[in-house]
Image: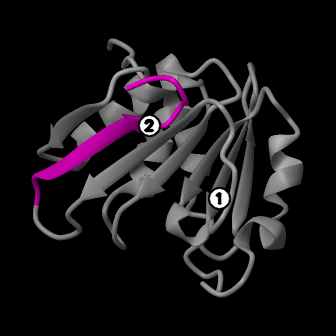
C-alpha cells in the first residue's frame, strides 16, 4: 500500500467498496496531523467507509468506527494524534454549524486530524492551512469517481 500525495489534485475510480476503503488507507498513511478533510458525497456514497480506511492506516480498530450522523462528532484516539469525525448532515442549513458543534475548539488541537462529512453546511468558515476536499461522485451504482483537491493556499 502506497500513501497518496495529498499535495496534488487527483481523481481516482472506485469500482468496489474495498477500493474506497483502500483509498482511505492510502490517505491515512499520508496524514501527519493537523489536516482537515472535507468529505462530500450523497447519502451512501462511502464517506464513512473512506474514514474507516483512514483510521485503519492509523492502527485503529475499524469495528469501532461508526457514522457520526446522530452523535455529530466521534473522537478516535490513535497512537499519533486524535481524529475527529464530524457529520453535519443533521445540522440545520440555516444554523452556524461550526459553532453548533464546537469546531473552533476542535481545531485548537493543531495536531488532530478533522474529517468533516457534509462540509457544504460550513458557511463562511475559515479552513485551516492543511485542508483537502474529497468528493465522492455517485451514490448508487459503482464505479464512483473520487476526487481529491488540495485547498492549501499557494498550491495547485
> Would you say residue 145 sits in the magenta stretch?
yes
Dividing the picture into quadrants, the one containing residue 112 is top right
- Point 62% across, 66% down: residue: 122
Q: Quadrant of residue 156?
A: top left
Could you tell me which secondary element the residue under label 2 belongs to?
helix
The vertical placement of 13 against 31, above or below, is below
Foreground disc of the pair 2, 1: 1
Q: Please indicate, yes or no, whether residue 65 appears anywhere in the rendered image.
A: no
Q: Are dots 2 and 1 in contact, CB under 8 Å?
A: no
- Is residue 69 one of those drawn in magenta? no
* Residue 144 marker: none
Using residue 123 as the reference point, say whether residue 109 is left or right of it.
Answer: right
Q: Which residues are magenta?
A: 142-156
Q: How many marks?
A: 2
Q: CA distance from mark 2 to mark 1?
A: 16 Å
92 shown above or below 11: below
Q: Pick the residue in front: 150 or 57.
A: 150
Task: Identify the image quadrant of the N terminus.
Answer: top left
Say which residue appears at 42% left-offset and 20% top-offset: 7
Q: Which residue is mark 1?
A: 86
| Residue closest to the far front | 154
Amino acid at each position: 500500500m502506497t500513501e497518496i500525495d495529498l499535495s496534488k489534485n487527483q481523481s481516482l475510480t472506485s469500482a468496489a467498496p474495498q477500493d474506497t476503503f483502500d483509498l482511505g488507507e492510502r490517505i491515512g498513511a499520508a496524514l501527519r496531523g493537523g489536516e482537515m478533510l472535507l468529505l462530500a458525497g450523497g447519502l451512501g456514497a462511502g464517506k464513512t467507509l473512506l474514514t474507516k480506511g483512514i483510521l485503519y492506516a492509523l492502527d485503529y480498530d475499524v469495528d469501532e468506527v461508526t457514522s457520526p450522523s446522530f452523535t455529530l462528532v466521534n473522537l478516535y484516539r490513535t497512537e499519533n494524534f486524535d481524529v475527529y469525525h464530524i457529520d453535519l448532515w443533521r445540522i440545520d442549513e440555516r444554523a452556524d454549524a461550526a459553532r453548533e458543534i464546537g469546531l473552533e475548539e476542535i481545531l485548537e488541537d493543531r495536531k488532530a486530524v478533522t474529517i468533516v462529512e457534509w462540509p457544504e453546511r460550513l458557511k463562511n468558515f475559515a479552513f485551516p492551512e492543511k485542508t483537502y476536499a474529497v468528493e465522492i461522485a455517485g451514490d448508487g451504482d459503482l464505479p464512483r469517481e473520487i476526487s481529491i483537491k488540495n485547498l492549501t493556499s499557494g498550491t495547485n
